[in-house]
Amino acid sequence: MKIHEYQAKEILKQYGVAVPRGHVAFSVEEAVKAAQSLPGPVWVVKAQIHAGGRGKGGGVKLARSIDEVRERASEILGMKLVTHQTGPEGRIVKRLLVEEGMNIARELYVGITLDRSMSRNVLMASTEGGVEIEKVAAETPEKILKEFVDPAVGLQAFQIRRLCFGLGLSGDTMKNAMKFFAALYKAYEATDASLAEINPLVLTREGTVLALDAKINFDDNALFRHPDFMDLRDFDEEDPLEVEASKSNLNYIKLDGNVGCMVNGAGLAMATMDIIKLAGGMPANFLDVGGGASAQTVEAGFRIILKDPHVKAVLINIFGGIVRCDRVATGVVEAAKKVDVHVPIVVRLAGTNADLAADILRNSGMRFLVASNLKDAAEKVTKAIAA
Amino acid sequence: MSVLVNKKTKLVVQGITGGEGTFHTKQMMEYGTNVVAGVTPGKGGTMYDGNEKDRFPRPVPVFNTVSEAVQKTGADTSVIFVPAGFAADAIMEAAEAGIKVIVTITEGIPANDMVRVYEYLRKNNVRMIGPNCPGIITPGECKIGIMPGFIHKPGRVGLVSRSGTLTYEAVWQMTERGIGQSTCIGIGGDPVIGTRFVDAVKLFNEDRNTDAIVMIGEIGGTAEEEAAEYIKKHVKKPVVGFIAGQTAPPGRRMGHAGAIIAGGKGTAAEKVAAMKAAGIHVVDSPALIGEMVERVLGRRKAGKTAGGKKKVVRSKGKAARRGGKRSRKGRRK
């Protein structure tokens, strides 16, 4: 789960991570009020969307007076912000963060995440702050310092010291940075985050160390331990179809193609998308109906897939192991009768009672294209989209 | 022969009295798995034979703790159907009790829990499969997990995969062609897992009754690349591979917690390139996995010595479970 920068900073503050003073604003008036409560004389107005690259896209602006805050806020609020992470359609900015301006001496990078190849959390830091860290990792990997955390004992002070020395810190800045890293790690663990990234981490001329930006993602599997985090969810940042699907317990992701698909199991769903592409189409979605594949879930799946006007055909691919194919077939027929399906439907059911299922589909009086195996399904999809 | 589990395996089911635990214990017992015990804290000292919906072929003794189950029944392998919030504890309990192979079916365990579990298992030298996986099966001998038993057939191809139904698909394509499997391992789609591709490949490589290996990966992480590196250096047996998610967009979690292209890493293209460079027979389409296995086995049959030839012929025998069992027995004698 993703949250906004201002929400991440509020959480970090609770764990003792230093952040600039600031307030969230939902309107220009609120932005002005927020600025008035800060000392000035420089303020920063920041668009709050769940995507990086906001500065480059014109979503972060400096203001040198309250009037300028008003101007910048009215420019950014409501704008369509396009960044490399939003795609060309961009996002409408509905929230702002107004912060005090900082006297920046240096910009660094620090991030904590799970290193999958080590099965350990890793604290990473780099002198190359404020730029895309993926680029640094690809071009100059030696500039990223890493400390792996032994889960039996946690992050140790010597590891943080080593990082700080590696970043070339000393004196008061070093002391503050040590406190900062320790607090950041504590926040990461306590909130069951999957990512805590501060880019840039700034050293000010006064020797303080602050999180100028903050990004926290939570581990979805651990949300049951943090019921209060549900209030942080911003539905404006999510695709409405995906939100609707999640209400029916469907795992749906909207894509740009022309062939809708409905599959049981995530791996098979991805493989089915690949088949569609090889057949000359493009998948319109990822949709995992889970283990059950009942009439209700299939119906909900149809409704969501067919709301996408680009869909020219639907491919249903269910491998019935424990779940019986004849039941799934009955569900598909029932659902197709309830929903006005105006595109060809290719159905491929394999596994338990697959023959029975094929009979049910053929005798339903509806025009399903019944495929006997994956290869056949791909060929039938190719024909369906060509027609 | 096979890897990790066989007909000698003595299984304890953790969470046996729950809905999932009951249903799948019945399925496992019917397949022939030797279920010797169940564990449900608070229900120790009873015998459990399922519920009205799912009745076991025979009752199973239930214990309060795994260590008691191990002491009284000699259980050496555990399967876990405990809910996500309690799963980490259940895994460590099994490891502490002396269980050597733990199969964790549970989905949705927090990654931070798994980081701690992984370290604990490593220190105690315990093999875990999963979490969030279909389990492991040695066809005709022992099924531990939730996979449908009937799609499998005893034979000599080892399979390792990150997914559930996609694994069934691949197995089915082989079985339909008369190609049996030595053991099939579903390692799971989470970021932290007990057995990785490279571990499973190593086991299959060292198993003298596995002739070929099928490896089914998906986007996210670098575990496939890691295995490819190992295969390049150490594996002479033919390996067939497929990577799901060629059309998956970056930054989106495709169902599995681990199936995400992050920071430009973990794309299907990278994985396929690494696997091809290691000499793995990678298919573009998941529909072609069975065909490719058939081809590499055929090629092997033609090019190898009489011994190798015999093995392959035997694995392609018509008889299903029974036949496979017998031929294995014969070899052991």
Image (cartoon, rainbow, N blue to C red):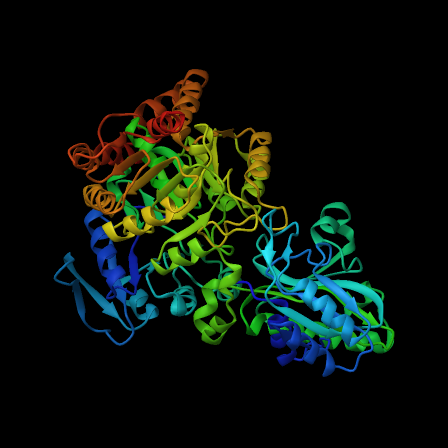
Counting from the top left corner in percent of width and height, residue A327 is at: 19, 45
Q: Which quadrant holds residue A79?
A: bottom right
- Name which residue lies at 75% across and 64% down: A61
User: Is A237 on the left-hand or right-hand side of A6?
Assistant: left
Counting from the top left corner in percent of width and height, residue B317 is at: 26, 25
User: Is B150 on the left-hand or right-hand side of B237?
Assistant: left
Report the front residue among A155 and B36.
A155
Residue B114 showing in the rendered view: no
Which quadrant of the figure contains the C terminus of chain A? top left
Report the front residue among A170 and A303.
A303
Q: Which quadrant holds residue A123?
A: bottom right
Counting from the top left corner in percent of width and height, residue B308 is at: 40, 23
- Name which residue lies at 68% across and 80% down: A33
Residue A315 showing in the rendered view: yes
* Residue, far left: B52
Q: Is residue B250 above or below residue B274?
A: below
Counting from the top left corner in percent of width and height, residue A283 is at: 45, 38
